[in-house]
Image (spheres, helix red, strand yellow):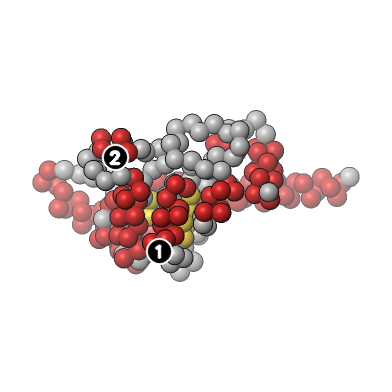
Amino acid sequence: MPDERAETDESQGQATSNLAWFLTGAFIGAAAAVLYAPQSGKETRKYLSDKTQRGRDAVESAGQLGVRMLTIHLSGGSEMIRAATTARANNMLLLGVTVLTSSTEETQREIGIASGVADQVLRLAKLGVNAGIDGVVASPHEIKPLRREFAHKMKIVVPGIRPSGAEANDQKRTMSPRDALDAGADYLVIGRPITAHRNPREAVDKILEELRC
């Protein structure tokens, strides 16, 4: 019994460590994204220069903290992306966010983008690849178009993953873990189906069972 308890504690400790590592990367990615918020008026030209430098500094700082995955928003443009890619550590995957999984065609039109979601994702992905990005963050609905266009030149990180029985919440473009992997995803981002579950460990076990099927 003591040995089993020790193994369980060690397993839970490792899971907590992995979760803490993930959250560190997520929060730094969010902080970096704030730096890329658009400005207007006569400060725009100065801001573009400032944001590039600040973006580079943010990526360097994340690398020094040991962050292994960091996200930036590809809508920030090629200058910002190149500044970020030149500052990343060798063991860091720099990922470009394309179109949020909570967005729809209507959302695109509201912000002045006439093209559909899939076209916009591909457009931003091309921008990122040409600027040296390591991978993209996109919904599961765009995995196959991205693989057709880029094969395995980059990693595809996929949020909007919903195991069977999980609520969609605010996510509009979702898919099951098994289907997303079969479509060609490299990494799955699974948040609320685990964190909001009454028993997170049980939720993880259920997801793993789905993936074995």
Q: Is residue 213 left or right of residue 102?
A: right
Query: Among all residues in the image, which is located at the extreme left?
Result: 42
Name the image quarter holding residue 60. Answer: bottom left
Identify the amino acid type marked 2. Answer: Gln
Identify the amino acid type marked 1. Answer: Phe
Query: Among all residues in the image, which is located at the extreme bottom?
Result: 90
From this view, report whether residue 37 is shown above or below residue 146: above
Query: What is the secondary structure assignment of the residue under circle 2?
Result: helix
The label shown at residue 108 is: 2
Which residue is depicted at the point 40% across and 64% down?
A: 150
Query: Among all residues in the image, which is located at the extreme right?
Result: 1
* Crowd class of label 2 (few under 14; some 14 to 19; many from 20; radius 10 Å): some
- Pointers 2 and 1 in contact (CB under 8 A)? no
- Please provide percent x and percent y for residue 45: 14, 53
Q: Can you identify the residue that label 1 sits on?
A: 150
- Please provide percent x and percent y for residue 109: 26, 37
Q: How many marks?
A: 2
From this view, report whether residue 195 is shown above or below residue 69: above
Q: Is residue 99 left or right of residue 161?
A: left
Q: Which mark sits nearer the N-terminus, 2 or 1?
A: 2
State whether residue 159 appears in this view.
yes
Which residue is depicted at the point 68% across and 50% down?
A: 212
**Quadrant of the image containing the N terminus:** top right
- Please provide percent x and percent y for residue 130: 31, 65
The label shown at residue 199 is: none
Which residue is depicted at the point 52% across and 43% down?
A: 175
